[in-house]
Structure formats: structure tokens, C-alpha cells
């Protein structure tokens, strides 16, 4: 992101900047801030009880969904090795009350599970064409 | 991100459907000819029949070192042990339950593999399509079926005694010509062949590789310092003593390992997919000699 | 005016230091077998025992003038070529978005 902004500055010959020094300073300060971590609400930190409960359910429901989708991937013989460990990590985090960690791992697990099912469906449709492309049939 | 990939998948499927409607299904023999031509064109210096030496057929420098290893092969002891296991009679006590049918009792006590196989040198009869059972039968499967049908517990599929007996039988079969058949009078045989082919060309795992990506279009290229071997001749030299394993392992063990390398969950050894894959790739190597067991890094 | 330029210059230096940091981290991710593992297929930089599955990574700004196009290629190379052997590092979650940012910065610098 910061590179893109810097890129704009270097291309900016057509930009009519009154005070180029200030512009550079502003740009640089934005780059310094750089990658801002997305704010995650930690339970117990001045957060209403309903939000906390919602958080728990979110992670748990994402884990449940990841498990269901992964079961489908397994049935299609396209399960990835990384999915089950991600689910385990999410469950462990949930058990120990680390809701942020649980959500992070759960979402990763869901991405893996969905990616593997998509792959199964795509390859079912594409493998013939891959054979033709490769062998020049 | 999910929306984009869904649209992409739909576009890919649409594009594929549009372009594959005119393609007729080739016969296994036509498939084999195209397969062989691909590798002969890619590696024109490989002598006819030399594909059975795997990566060493395309890497003359490494070959000398490998041939030295084969002088005193690491699987020698395994062959001897395999021979012993092959000739050993089945257990006469404990495994046989009383009250079972006359049929079971018939195969108990003192019967050995010799009663299932006419001789150990029958490597070239596998894999084959069993019409009655509608399945591909591999050598390892036949070995365990002999055990089980004689009241013994099946051995584990990937290593240990099954690999040793397979090694012994493969050794006794050296020089036999690979001659897998896809019987024309059973469409299910062709289905199994096509399933193996589909597996070969399908990308899998988080890393999104197909067997073909590495062993066809990637053959001869290097992943890190390792040269990727061509699929032609792949099934000739199994089971294999791999230095990485420090022991013998079966072909399906290697399939599982390869899948795990690309972060695809291993499938069942001797399950439908791996047996179909072995069936397809063995057919592709028809005409070459069996030279197992082998040794690799 | 001078004061502003001086502030600007020091902040710019800090920014390029941050960039240098990202590039170094990007190299670590690229070389890490468990992450980018780029050396398995690509000859690049000072990598040892590199594979030749893919093209050598050199003159990258000439090959990919636009940073975003390089990033997209690393994120999902199957968009440009559905039959590529290169893993979709972003789409399949092999690397995080942040890791891909850093790897792209590193590779773009080669």
C-alpha cells in the first residue's frame, strides 16, 4: 500500500503541489503507519456482555461450517492437509478463551475447506482440457 | 474474494464445456501412444526400454552413482526376508475360529502363498481388471487377499511384510514385460482407466499440483536440487527402498507421500483412486520391462 | 520551508527504511520452505540450489512494471494461465495478505 502511494508521488510531475516538502512528509507519515492491524474486540475489555457472547458464537459457528465443508472435500477426495490442523487450532483457541485467535484460525480453516471443494469441482470440469493442453492432442 | 473466485470458476467451466464438446474419448492404446510420444520427444536421448530406470534414464551423471548403489542394493535383505515370508506356512493356531464353515477350514493350517499364486514370479499379471468384482486388483491386494482368505490378518499396505513379499515376487519377475489390459467387453474397466487418468491430470492440494505438472510437463526440470522423473516407466520398479524412508515402501505409499507434499490429504492405499492411478500408469508403461524392486534417494 | 523539507526528508528516510524492512522480511518469507518456498522453482537473488521449474526472477521491474500486476500473479497465477504449475499463494491461503505484500515488494526489487 505504501509503495502505491509513493508511486503516485514519483509520477506526480503533473501534480500541482504548492508545498512539495509537506506533501512528501504527509506521504511518508502515512507509509510509516503502514499496515494497520484490524481492530479486534477482546472480551472483558470494556465490551458489553452481548458482544462477548456474539463473538463466541461467531468463532464456533465458523468452526462448525469449516468442519461441514471439509467433510465434503474429504468425500470428494480433495481434502487439504492444512484444513484439519487449522480447525484444531481454532478449537483450542476457543477452549482457552482466545476469541480473536479462534476466529482467525476458524476463518483460515473455512478458506481452506471452501478452496478444496472449489478445487474439486473445478478440476472435475477442467482435467480433460489440461490433458489436451499438455499432450497437444 | 469468494465472489470473484466463484465467477472465475463459472467462467472456467463455461470455457471448458465450450471447448471439450467436440473431443471424442480416445482408446487406452491411443492414449498410450500419445503419452509415449510426449516423453520420447522431450527426452530424445533415452534408449528404448530405458524408462524403467526412472530419473536415472534422463540423468546420465547421477546414473553411475546409482548403478554403484544397485551393485549391493539396500533391498537385498528384504528380498531374502520376503522369500522366507512367502514360503512360510500360515499360523495353525489362534487365528482360526472354531465353528466356521467348512470352506474356511479348508484353507487353514499349513497353506501358504504358494497355494494362491502358481509361482512367485507373477508380477506381470498385476494390476488387472477383475470383471466379477468390478475392481482393479493390484499385486499387494492379491497378497493380502491370500492371507485373509487363509484366516490370517491383512498386513498394513505401505511397508513392512507386504513390501517384502512384493519385493520378492517382483524380483522373481524381473524382465517380464508390462502388459496391462483394459478389456473391451467391460465398460467399467475403461471407467477405472479413465478415473486413473483423471487423477493424473487433476490439480490437488493447497499447492494446486497435478501429477502431470511435475512428472509430465515438469519432468527433467528441477524442484530445488531434485530432478523430476518422467511418468513413463514409473510403475516398473516397485516396491522401492527409499533412502528417505530407510526402508522398503510400496507404490501406494509413494502416492500418499507425493500427495502430502502438495498438501493434499493422503488417500487410502489400495483404495479406488490409487488403484485406478496405478492401473492407468501401468498401462502407459506397457511394453517396458519390470525391474523391481528398486532403490532411490 | 527548510524546516518542512528537513522534516519531510527525515520522514521519507524513515519510510524507505520501513520499505527496506518489508523487502528483507519478504525475502525471508520467499526463502522459507514452509511459506513462499520460491527457491524450489525459481532461480533468484543469492538463493542456493534453486530449481528451474519456473523462470529466473530477475529484471522484475522490466517484466512487471506495475507492482499490482506482480502481486496479482503471486496471489493467483491461474488467472493469467489456468494451467500454470505455480501455486495460488493468496487464493489458497498459503501466504497471508501481509506476507504477499512483503514478498511482492522483495520480488519486485530483484
Image: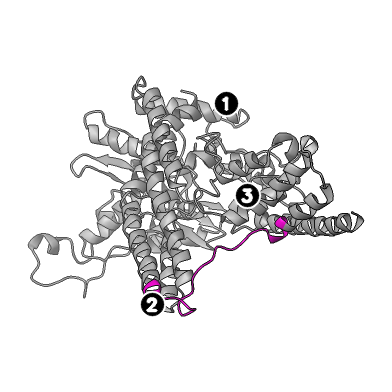
Q: Residue tagged by mark 2? A: A49
- Which is in the foreground here, disc 1 or disc 3? 1
Q: Is residue C84 left or right of residue A11?
A: left
The reply to whether residue B212 is visible in this rendering is yes
Majority SS type along the magenta span: loop
User: Residue B50 at x, y = what percent?
Assistant: 55, 36
Q: In the rendered structure, does residue A45 fall within the stretch colored magenta?
A: yes
Name the one closer to the observer, B73 or B145: B145
The answer to whether dots 2 and 3 both sit on one chain is: no
Element type where label 2 sits in the image: helix
Which of the numbered marks, if any, corresponds to residue B41? 1
Is C71 in front, or is B216? C71
Q: Quarter-wise, where is residue B218 in the image? A: top right
In which quadrant of the rendered view does residue B163 lie?
A: bottom left
User: Residue C17: x, y in percent?
Assistant: 79, 59
Say what secondary structure mark 1 lies in.
Answer: helix
Q: Which residues are magenta?
A: A30-52
* Mark 1 → mark 2, Cα distance in angstroms: 69 Å
Q: On what subunit does the disc labeled 3 rest?
A: B
Q: Quadrant of the C terminus of chain B?
A: bottom right
**Residue at the top extreme of this rendering:** B22
Q: Which mark is residue B66?
A: 3
Q: Nearer the viewer, mark 2 or mark 3?
A: 2
> With respect to residue A41, does B147 lie above or below?
above
x then y, percent, for residue C52:
66, 41
Q: Seen in the image, is A75 located left or right of residue A95?
A: left
Residue at horizontal 48 percent and vertical 78 percent from the top: A46
What SS does tag 3 mark?
A: helix
C65 sits left or right of B91 in the view: right
Marked residue nearer the N-terminal end (1 or 3): 1
Amino acid at each position: 500500500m505504501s509503495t502505491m502511494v509513493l508511486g503516485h508521488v514519483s509520477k506526480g510531475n503533473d501534480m500541482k503541489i504548492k508545498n512539495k516538502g509537506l506533501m512528501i512528509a504527509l506521504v511518508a507519515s502515512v507509509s510509516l503507519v503502514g499496515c494497520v492491524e484490524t481492530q479486534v474486540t477482546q472480551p472483558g475489555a470494556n465490551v458489553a456482555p452481548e458482544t462477548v457472547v456474539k463473538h463466541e458464537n461467531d468463532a464456533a459457528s465458523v468452526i462448525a461450517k469449516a468442519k461441514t465443508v471439509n467433510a465434503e472435500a474429504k468425500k470428494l477426495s480433495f481434502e487439504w492437509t492444512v484444513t484439519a490442523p487449522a480447525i484444531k487450532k481454532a478449537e483450542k483457541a476457543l477452549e482457552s478463551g482466545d476469541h480473536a485467535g479462534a476466529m482467525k484460525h476458524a476463518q483460515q480453516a473455512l478458506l481452506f475447506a471452501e478452496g478444496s471443494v472449489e478445487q474439486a469441482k473445478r478440476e472435475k470440469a477442467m482435467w480433460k482440457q489440461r490433458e489436451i493442453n499438455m499432450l497437444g492432442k | 474474494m469468494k465472489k470473484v473466485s466463484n465467477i472465475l470458476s463459472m467462467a472456467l467451466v463455461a470455457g471448458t464445456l465450450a471447448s471439450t464438446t467436440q473431443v471424442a474419448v480416445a482408446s487406452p492404446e491411443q492414449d498410450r501412444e500419445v503419452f509415449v510420444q510426449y516423453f520420447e520427444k522431450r527426452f530424445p536421448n533415452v534408449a528404448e526400454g530405458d524408462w524403467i530406470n526412472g530419473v536415472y534414464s534422463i540423468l546420465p551423471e547421477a546414473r553411475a552413482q546409482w548403478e554403484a548403489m544397485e551393485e549391493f542394493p539396500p533391498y537385498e535383505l528384504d528380498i531374502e526376508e520376503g522369500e522366507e515370508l512367502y514360503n512360510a506356512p500360515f499360523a495353525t493356531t489362534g487365528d482360526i475360529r472354531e465353528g466356521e464353515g467348512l470352506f474356511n477350514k479348508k484353507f487353514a493350517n499349513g497353506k501358504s502363498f504358494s497355494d494362491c499364486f502358481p509361482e512367485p514370479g507373477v508380477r506381470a499379471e498385476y494390476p488387472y481388471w477383475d470383471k466379477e468384482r468390478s475392481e482393479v486388483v493390484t499385486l499387494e491386494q492379491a497378497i493380502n487377499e491370500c492371507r485373509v482368505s487363509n484366516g490370517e490378518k491383512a498386513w498394513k499396505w505401505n511397508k513392512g511384510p507386504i513390501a517384502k513379499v512384493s519385493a520378492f515376487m517382483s524380483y522373481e519377475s524381473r524382465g517380464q514385460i508390462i502388459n496391462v489390459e483394459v478389456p473391451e467387453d467391460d465398460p467399467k474397466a475403461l471407467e477405472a482407466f479413465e478415473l486413473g487418468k483423471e487423477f493424473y491430470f487433476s490439480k490437488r492440494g493447497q499447492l494446486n499440483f497435478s501429477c502431470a505438472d511435475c512428472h509430465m510437463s515438469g519432468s527433467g526440470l528441477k524442484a530445488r536440487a531434485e530432478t523430476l522423473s518422467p511418468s513413463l516407466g514409473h510403475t516398473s520398479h516397485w516396491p522401492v527402498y527409499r533412502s528417505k524412508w530407510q526402508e522398503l515402501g510400496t507404490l501406494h505409499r509413494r502416492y500418499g507421500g507425493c500427495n502430502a507434499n502438495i498438501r493434499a490429504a493422503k488417500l487410502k492405499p489400495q483404495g479406488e483412486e490409487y488403484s485406478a492411478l496405478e492401473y492407468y500408469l501401468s498401462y502407459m508403461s506397457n511394453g517396458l520391462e519390470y525391474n523391481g524392486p528398486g532403490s532411490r534417494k | 520551508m527548510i524546516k518542512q523539507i528537513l522534516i519531510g526528508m527525515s520522514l521519507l528516510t524513515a519510510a524507505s527504511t520501513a520499505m527496506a524492512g518489508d523487502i528483507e522480511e519478504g525475502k525471508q518469507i520467499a526463502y522459507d520452505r514452509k511459506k513462499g518456498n520460491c527457491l524450489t522453482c525459481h532461480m533468484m537473488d543469492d538463493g542456493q540450489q534453486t530449481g528451474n521449474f519456473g523462470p529466473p526472477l530477475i529484471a522484475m521491474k522490466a517484466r512487471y512494471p506495475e507492482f499490482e500486476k506482480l502481486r496479482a500473479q503471486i496471489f493467483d497465477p491461474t488467472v493469467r494461465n489456468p494451467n500454470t504449475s505455480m501455486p495460488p499463494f493468496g487464493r489458497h491461503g498459503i501466504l497471508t495478505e501481509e506476507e504477499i505484500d512483503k514478498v511482492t515488494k522483495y520480488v519486485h526489487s530483484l
